[in-house]
């Protein structure tokens, strides 16, 4: 095989899209030369040490690809950004977006048992959320020979995916990665889209709006061939590229570096035509393990989660015979890394994609958006709610945010922070932390003046243990003393 020299692609084009896309100022549109060299060096080390026939990588920042590079060769030439690679389980992120779209349209609830919408499933009581988060207890793999290397025609019906013991663990108790669970989710999409194949639903509802016309179920030229690399010799063996049929939602897709840059920009910011930022944030919420407690890796709704060097990354890794892929996105820093390669094993694609984001942040820390006042008009009653509040004697600050949102943060000692979304009935709903899902209400006295805040039965007053407020258990009538 002829090995092409490493290369950086020409200046990347913007991949931002939709209302959330923000143009990058010209002075920051390109990375510094030393940053680009560090990125190319990391990609080159990954390709050489991983013994990959070819490898491509990219960094997305501020809604656009700011760096792309390649090593090795595809058909004797350095791969460019329009060469397809198989992306394996990155497919699951696309399927999860389809399911969340159905939820947002009111066609299902994540708490619904899958059997309510899909007949004949072996786990009718498992919820859709459990399937998305790999906590349904379903078997990891389908019945029969290694599904990734055999034709889907071997399993033509849903019943052919399961053996006599389809559920390995109790539903909802533990994380147990299940490829067959995503086969059920693909069937669910088809059922609720009136029998339209899930791949066609994906093309129509997601890929076309995002301009991802090079992401397909079957390879379309130009594409890379998949290889196995001999463990003890620099020799290659071609891998099969089967159509996996019903197992397609678990890992069938082929895509390009350019298309995955668009997908990364979408995962970072959302797009009203496909899925909004709030639903994407929900996908990134840890489902297993729980939000509390120390963990290095977890899973949300269709996305893997990784804690790395103090940052939370969301995305997915993928593997199919002959291919490895990874996409990690840091929403706090608005940066993502993508890696594609065409060998079954060897390169640490996930670590490499995470490193690409870290290199950019280390060399060129993100310049924050300029502070701007809230868009008007300003509601004086909301403004009057801001400032210090006390839970018992523990001081907190209530701040006004965009779209009538509120944020509660402790001012000293231990305390619970949370952001709140304004509701039409004049209440607020907690978005994160201990108060996620809880209701914040403003309570008033007989004269209409604000008396206190009621947050899931916790009473917040304007003064510490304020006697005039209905503090649970009352306040000692003699008051504070020394």
Image (cartoon, rainbow, N blue to C red):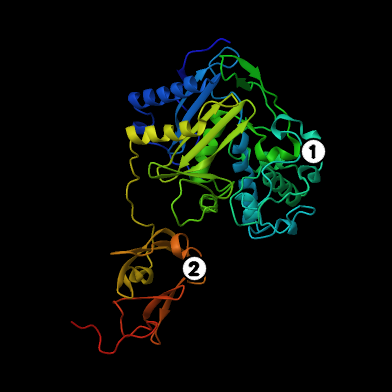
Q: Is residue 255 left or right of residue 71?
A: right
Residue extending farthest to the front is 232
Residue 140 in which image quadrant: top right
Residue 410 in which image quadrant: bottom left
Q: Residue at x 38, y 62 (%)?
A: 417
Q: Residues within 10 Å of mark 2 (few under 14, many from 20)?
A: some
For marks 2 and 1, the one nearer the N-term is 1
x, y (%) of residue 55?
A: 52, 23
State the mark number for residue 155. Answer: 1
Q: Which residue is mark 2?
A: 438
Q: Is residue 326 above or below residue 190?
A: above
139 or 450: nearer the eye?
139
Q: Quadrant of the C terminus?
A: bottom left
Residue extending farthest to the top is 2
x, y (%) of residue 150?
A: 74, 30
Q: Quadrant of the N terminus?
A: top right
Secondary structure category for the residue under label 2:
loop
Secondary structure category for the residue under label 1:
loop
Residue 101 in sight: no
x, y (%) of residue 367?
A: 33, 40
Q: Residue at x 33, y 76 (%)?
A: 392
Residue extending farthest to the left is 482
- Separation (CA) of disc 2 from disc 1: 45 Å
x, y (%) of residue 6?
A: 46, 16
State the mark number for residue 57. Answer: none
User: How many numbered badges does the structure rendering display?
Assistant: 2
Give the foreground label among 2 and 1: 1
Residue 262 in sight: yes
Q: Residue at x 39, y 57 (%)?
A: 375
Q: Is residue 46 above or below residue 469?
A: above
Q: Residue at x 63, y 57 (%)?
A: 110
């Amino acid at each position: 095989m002829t090995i092409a020299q490493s290369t950086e692609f020409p200046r990347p084009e913007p991949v931002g899209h939709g209302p959330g896309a923000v143009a990058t100022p010209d002075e920051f549109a390109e990375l510094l030369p030393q940053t680009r060299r560090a990125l190319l060096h990391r990609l080159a080390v990954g390709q050489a040490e991983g013994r990959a026939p070819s490898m491509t990588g990219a960094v997305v920042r501020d809604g656009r690809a700011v760096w792309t590079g390649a090593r090795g060769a595809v058909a004797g030439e350095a791969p460019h950004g329009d060469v397809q690679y198989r992306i394996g389980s990155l497919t699951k992120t696309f399927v999860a977006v389809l399911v969340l779209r159905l939820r947002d349209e009111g066609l299902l609830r994540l708490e619904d048992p899958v059997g309510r919408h899909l007949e004949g499933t072996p786990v009718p009581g498992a919820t859709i959320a459990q399937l998305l988060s790999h906590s349904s207890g379903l078997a990891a793999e389908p019945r029969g020979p290694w599904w990734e290397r055999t034709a889907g025609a071997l399993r033509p019906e849903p019943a052919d995916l399961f053996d006599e013991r389809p559920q390995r663990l109790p539903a909802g108790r533990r994380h147990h990665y299940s490829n067959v669970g995503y086969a059920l989710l693909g069937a669910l999409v088809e059922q609720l889209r009136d029998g339209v194949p899930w791949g066609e639903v994906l093309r129509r509802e997601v890929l076309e709006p995002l301009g991802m016309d090079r992401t397909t179920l079957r390879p379309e030229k130009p594409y890379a061939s998949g290889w196995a690399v001999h463990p003890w010799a620099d020799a290659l063996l071609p891998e099969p590229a089967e159509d996996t049929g019903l197992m397609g939602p678990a890992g069938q897709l082929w895509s390009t570096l350019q298309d995955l840059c668009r997908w990364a920009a979408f995962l970072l910011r959302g797009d009203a035509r496909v899925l909004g930022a709030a639903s994407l944030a929900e996908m990134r919420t840890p489902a297993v393990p729980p939000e509390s407690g120390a963990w290095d890796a977890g899973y949300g709704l269709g996305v893997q989660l990784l804690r790395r060097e103090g940052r939370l990354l969301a995305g997915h890794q993928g593997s199919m015979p002959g291919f490895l892929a990874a996409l990690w996105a840091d929403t706090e820093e608005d940066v993502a890394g993508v890696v594609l390669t065409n060998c079954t094993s060897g390169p640490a694609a996930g670590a490499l994609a995470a490193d690409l984001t870290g290199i950019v942040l280390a060399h060129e820390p993100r310049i924050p958006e300029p502070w701007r006042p809230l868009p008007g008009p300003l509601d004086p009653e909301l403004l009057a709610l801001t400032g210090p509040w006390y839970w018992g004697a523990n001081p907190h600050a209530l701040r006004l945010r965009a779209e009538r949102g509120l944020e509660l943060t402790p001012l000293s000692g231990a305390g619970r922070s949370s952001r709140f979304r304004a509701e039409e009935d004049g209440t607020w709903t907690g978005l994160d932390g201990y108060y996620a899902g809880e209701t914040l209400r403003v309570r008033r006295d007989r004269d209409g003046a604000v008396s206190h805040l009621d947050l899931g039965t916790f009473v917040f007053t304007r003064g510490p243990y304020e006697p005039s407020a209905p503090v649970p258990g009352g306040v000692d009538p003699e008051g504070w003393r020394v």
